[in-house]
Amino acid sequence: MASSALHRLVRFVPRSSPSKVLIGQPADKDIDVGAALRKGQEVSVNVWSGSSVLSPGSSTGTTETIDRVLSPLAQNEIGTIRCVGLNYRKHAAECGLDPPAIPVIFMKPATTIVDPWPARGTIPKLSQVDESGDYEAELAVVIGKTAKNVSEAEALDYVLGYTAANDVSSRTQQLNQSQWSFSKSFDGACPLGPTLVLKSLITDPTKLHMRGLKNGEVYQESGTDDLIFSVPKIISWLSQGTTLPPGTVIVTGTPAGVGMGRTPKDALRHGDEFAVEILPHIGTLTNIFENEKSGFMTKLTMCGIIRRDGAFAEYMTSWHGAVVSLPDSIGFEQAAPLMCAGATVRHAINQVDITEGETIGIIGIGGLGILGIQFAKARGYRVIAIDNHEVGLKLASGVPSHLQPDLILKLDDPETIQKVSDLTDGIGLKAAVVCTSHDAANDWAAQRLQPRGILVAAGFPEHGLTFDPMNLILKEIFVKGTVHGSMDETREMMEFVVQHGIRSHLTLLTMGEAEDIAARSEAHVLMGRPVVKIGMH
C-alpha cells in the first residue's frame, strides 16, 4: 500500500515515451489535473514504481509530463461497476419519486469505462434516435482490499480512494422498459477519472461539493451531504454475501439537474462537452461526446436544420456538427450540388467492393452521374458512362480531361451491350451505380454485371425496381440502396474534390426560374445540376 506521503494518483501516458503507461502523484498538490489539461497547461507528475493504483509501489524520484491522462484503473482491473440509482434526495424529488427505502442497485460492465479528455464519450445509436442521451455527475468509490459482509462501521477501511464519474444513460430504454443496466451499459458510457484521491485526503466523503457542467453551464450542483445512502452504507449493503475485490468501482448516484428532469427536457448530444467537478482534491473530469457511427440516418428530418424542413432561403440556422467548411477553391455555386448529388453518389460508390483498374458503369448522367464519373475515375477505376439522352451524353464528355470516362454509350444503341462486353473482356462490369429513375435501367445494368457484381440503385423508378430473377439469382448479384453520405464522408469528399479537380456541371437559375425546375428536369433540357442563386436576376 502507498506511504503516507501519497495522497493523489493519476495513470497517464508520458510525453517522453508515448508507448508507456505510468502512475504517479501530481507534482502540484493543489492542481486540478483534468481542468489544467483541458486548458492546455502542462501537468508534471512525480512517478511511482508500481504498474497500478492498486499497488503503486514507491517514489522513483523522477518527474514526467502528462501527454495523455487515463482513467485511474484499466478496464481489466475493474470487473463490474456497481451503481446506485436515486441516491440524492433532490434528484428523487425531481423524478417525482419518494426516497427509496433500500439502495437501488444496477451494474455497468468494464467496457463502459472511457478515459478523460481528450478521449471522447459516446452517444449510442439508440439514444440518437430520440435524443434520450443523458449525463449524470457522480462520485465514484474505488475499493482497495477484498470486502465481504462488512459492517457500516468498518466500510471505509476497505476504500482505496475516490474519483469522478459520468453515468451516461439512454433514458428511453431506462424509463419505458425499466432496463436500467441495459440503458447504462453501452461502450463508453462511464467516463472515469482523472485523479484518484486516496482516503487519507478525504476522511469524510459527505463533505464534498459536486457540479455537472454542460458546455460550460452549471446543470448540476450539490453537496454529497444530500446522499440518501452514505458511502459506508452502500459498501456494506453491496458486500453482503458478495465479494467486492480490489479495483471494484462503486458509482454512488447523481444529484438533481439531469437532462430528463429539466424543463424543457435536455439531452446529451453530439459535440456537447460535459464536465464533472468534485471539490476539494478530486478535480474535474471532462469529455466531449460524439455520436456512435452508424452510417444511417437516425432521424428522418433535414440534417442539422433547426426546427425547419428546408426551403429556398438566404440563411438557415444549423447545428455546428452538421456544417462542412468549404475550401477556398470551392465557391457556393460549386458546393451546392456537392452537398446533395455529390455526397449521395460518392456514398453510392463507397458501397461497391471494387479496386483500381476494375470497371464500373455509371448509368444516368445528370447531376449525380456526372460527379460519379469523376469520383470513380479519380479512384483509378475504368468508367463507362451510359445515358439515353443527348444532353446526358454531351455532359459526360464535358468533364475535365484527366477524368474522362473510358466509354460514353447510349443505353438503347444496339452496339452498346457488345461494347461493354469488349471493354470488360467478356466478363462484365464489376459494379454499376444507377443514377436515373428510368424503369428499365436497373435491370439493364444488372444484366451487364459479372457474377457477384454489385448494383447500387440511386434512382426511384415510377414502377419500382424490377429484375430478371434468373440473372439475379444465378449470377448472385448484389443489389444495394444508398442514402445521403455521413458527415465524415462529406468532409472527406470536399478534400477529394480539391485534390482531383472535380467539377459540378451547373445550370444557374434565378428565383423567378425556380418554379420550372421540375418540368425542365423531366424534359432533360437542364445541363448538370440546377442551382438557384438567391438575389440573381
Image: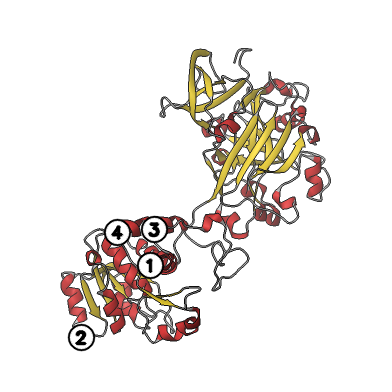
Vertical order, 206 against 302 (above or below): above
Q: Position of residue 181 (x, y in %)?
A: 64, 46
Q: Are marks 1 and 2 in contact (CB under 8 Å)?
A: no
Observer-side mark, 4 or 2, equals 4
SS at mark 4 in the image: helix
Query: What is the spatial separation of the Cα atoms under label 1 and label 3, in whole angstroms?
Result: 13 Å
Q: Which residue is mark 4?
A: 500
Q: Tell me whether circle 1 and circle 3 mark residues in contact (CB < 8 Å).
A: no
Which element is circle 2 on?
A: loop
Is residue 388 visible to the viewer in this orientation of the structure? no
Q: Amino acid at mark 3?
A: Met
**What residue sits 44% from the left and 55% below the top?**
488
Q: Give the amino acid type for the residue marked by disc 4 in the picture.
A: His
Q: Earlier in the sequence, mark 4 or mark 2?
A: 2
Kindly identify the residue that appears in the image at 30 percent across and 79 percent down.
392
* Residue to which mark 2 is pinned: 414
364 in relation to 232, above or below: below
Q: Label 2 amino acid? A: Pro
The tag on residue 345 is: 1
Label 1 to label 2: alpha-carbon separation: 28 Å
Q: Earlier in the sequence, mark 2 or mark 3?
A: 2
How far is mark 2 from mark 3, CA to CA?
39 Å
Query: Taking 516 as reference, is 472 left or right?
Result: left
Where does the image place residue 108, in percent across and percent down from the top left? Answer: 61, 41
> What is the spatial separation of the Cα atoms under label 3 and label 4, in whole angstroms?
10 Å
Mark 3 = which residue? 494
State the SS at label 3.
Answer: helix
| Quarter where residue 234 is shown | top right
Badge 1 crowding class, 10 Å Cα cut-off, few under 14, some 14 to 19, many 20 or more, is: many
